[in-house]
């Protein structure tokens, strides 16, 4: 071997990228990652049935069956992934770019699009964090994106986009529109599942990560069978391990527990929102998700001061000027956060 | 939306692909997938420590630490993946093609290369299932592959390639060579880890799937830190879930259990090999892995007849003429297989 430079060996589009940084920050109250504050109690009988030495079911039949029943679709309409992230990876691998999305939104559409060497188009939301329809329709016409991602409720803004604008985007796209409903369980809106029968180019992306099972990495895509078939061609056969499959099934079947955890988060969100409204230096944005975006003076300083007190939020200043994002925690965690915020935000 | 055809939306390289088929076949003795016949006993205390609602450690520090210690490398030299499959995906995403490998070999190099739209070059092994060096060196020179995959011990042939030929390939490559040591634990050869310090373009791929933990989907890549850094740029931050991480750590730390399971498989392999040699219609090839490839008259018929008796093997006729592959099972499973084979192979 002659000369050797790792970076110059990588594809040109990779060279300028940086690895995703997800540093673990020591903290007392972790409200940065939109996780549920409530864990799911895994029954020992579920674990005991798993054979560690056998490959997982490559078709995840039990899991897709349980999801199909819950969502009132058929198993061939469902593809499961190692988190929504992996499904985004597969979608872009299958259909390519350009990849269109509004900004700010979930960062992985852009990150994965870039990693796969596709062109990405991020178009600003309007002043109410809703879709800027003229902008979106213009881009659909001129750039003809293969994939458009609409996260609704949107992360980090917390709102749902107007249904009529979303429908207009779906209708105007000559390719696929993925409605990412990661936060739909916390929304009063029932989401786009009922629209699947009318729009063959619509895909719905969901996940168990926000409803108590982030540790499992289980996302799922729902859509027309022909589309799912194409994505299946690039899916790794054993992409969802035996633990994820088995525990996800038992969690889905235990609807009561999941529903009551979601209800508790929604009720805490309402309380947290009101409390934030009562803090002079803070202005929260209405949320249909399990987090609240709020504007606060000297946001970066407030973020750091909160961290010093043991409260970890997500600093969103880069995406929305002067804003922090707080995940809804338990009542005690939220109170701890509110008390700290009152002290540091002035 | 106007006209809509799912297939024509997919990238041209995807359209002609077929989804990986991994049908579940009902059987009594499952000897098709190179799984260990021995499960790993997962301690309840390991499971109990996992928070289902929290994201897994994106850097898998405990697992990479345990692996680094075992392999006598440093954590920055290790990247973990959701099975070796995912790491192959990431490697090809990062470095692109052409992708070179000998054939027959592990099918995923070609399958993933195609899914990612790269050109793949499969060069036949020589008559002893060893690398055909003139062929390989010629292709390295003319096609200048970005990635060369050498599975050693090779699947499905079972042999290790000659070290001197492998070294020659590594030395002659102007890019990366990945030595896939999925089956190394069953080999008397100590593998290529000691070569890492001499060859910056060498990467070693390993997995826990063959040593009792296929259900976890845990693979790992070992190599120069600069290379690992590049691959990390396309790695999804939460690619290995909390269960895989925690259980893998406890399995690695329980070296005694893993070693004794491996020893049992190797000893059964030797016995199985001799028994196959004693069956007139069958000709086994020497194996350094946890499976044996054997030639048998009317292989497809024998395969089907065995299946009827409840024994599932892998039909390798497509890759090596007239050959079946049997995974080493427990003593009882191997005896059941041998008895059935004696009856059906004539």
Image (tube, coloured by chain):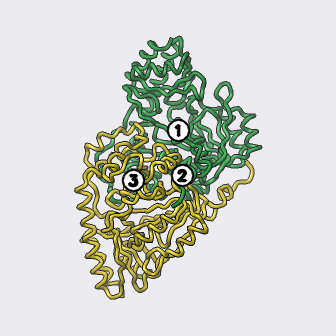
Chain colours: A green, B yellow
Vertical arrangement, residue B168 with respect to residue A77, above or below: below
Residue A91 at x, y percent in the picture: 59, 50
Q: CA distance from mark 3 to mark 2?
A: 28 Å
Write the residue at 51% across / 44% down: A84
Vertical arrangement, residue A59 with respect to residue A120, above or below: below
- Residue B203 showing in the rendered view: yes
Camera-nearest label, 2 or 1: 2
Q: CA distance from mark 2 to mark 1?
A: 40 Å
Numbered label attached to residue B218:
3
**Which chain is mark 2 on?**
A
Numbered label attached to residue A5:
2
Q: CA distance from mark 3 to mark 1?
A: 26 Å
**Which chain is mark 1 on?**
A
Residue B137 at x, y percent in the picture: 53, 71
Numbered label attached to residue A182:
1
Mark 3 vs mark 2: tell me if same chain: no
Alpha-carbon neighbours of circle 3 within 10 Å: few (<14), some, or many (≥20)? many
Write the residue at 36% across / 77% down: B306
Of helix, strand and loop, which one carries label 2?
loop
């Amino acid at each position: 071997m002659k000369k050797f430079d790792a970076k110059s060996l990588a594809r040109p589009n990779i060279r300028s990228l940086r690895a995703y940084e997800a540093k673990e920050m020591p903290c007392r109250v972790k409200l940065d990652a939109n996780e549920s504050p409530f864990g799911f109690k895994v029954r020992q009988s579920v674990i005991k049935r798993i054979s560690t030495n056998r490959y997982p079911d490559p078709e995840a039949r039990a899991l897709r069956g349980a999801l199909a029943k819950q969502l009132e679709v058929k198993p061939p309409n469902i593809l499961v992934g190692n988190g929504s992230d992996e499904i985004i990876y597969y979608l872009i691998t299958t259909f390519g770019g350009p990849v269109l999305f509004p900004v700010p939104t979930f960062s992985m559409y852009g990150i994965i699009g870039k990693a796969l060497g596709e062109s990405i188009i991020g178009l600003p939301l309007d002043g109410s964090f809703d879709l800027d329809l003229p902008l979106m329709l213009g881009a659909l016409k001129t750039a003809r994106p293969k994939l458009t991602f609409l996260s609704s409720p949107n992360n980090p803004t917390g709102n749902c986009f107007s249904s009529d604008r979303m429908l207009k985007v779906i209708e105007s796209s000559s390719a696929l529109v993925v409605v990412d409903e990661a936060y739909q369980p916390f929304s009063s809106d029932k989401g786009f599942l009922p629209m699947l029968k009318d729009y063959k180019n619509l895909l719905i992306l969901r996940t168990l990560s926000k409803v108590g099972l982030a540790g499992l990495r289980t996302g799922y895509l729902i859509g027309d069978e022909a589309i799912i078939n194409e994505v299946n061609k690039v899916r790794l056969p054993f992409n969802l391990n035996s633990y994820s499959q088995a525990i996800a099934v038992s969690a889905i079947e235990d609807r009561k527990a999941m529903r009551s955890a979601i209800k508790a988060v929604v009720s805490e969100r309402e309380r947290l929102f009101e409390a934030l409204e009562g803090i002079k230096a803070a202005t929260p944005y209405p949320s249909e998700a399990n987090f609240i975006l709020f504007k606060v003076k000297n946001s970066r300083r407030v973020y750091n001061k909160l961290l010093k007190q043991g409260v970890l939020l997500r600093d969103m200043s880069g995406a929305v000027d002067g804003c922090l994002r707080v995940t809804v925690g338990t009542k005690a965690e939220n109170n701890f956060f509110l008390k700290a915020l009152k002290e540091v935000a002035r």
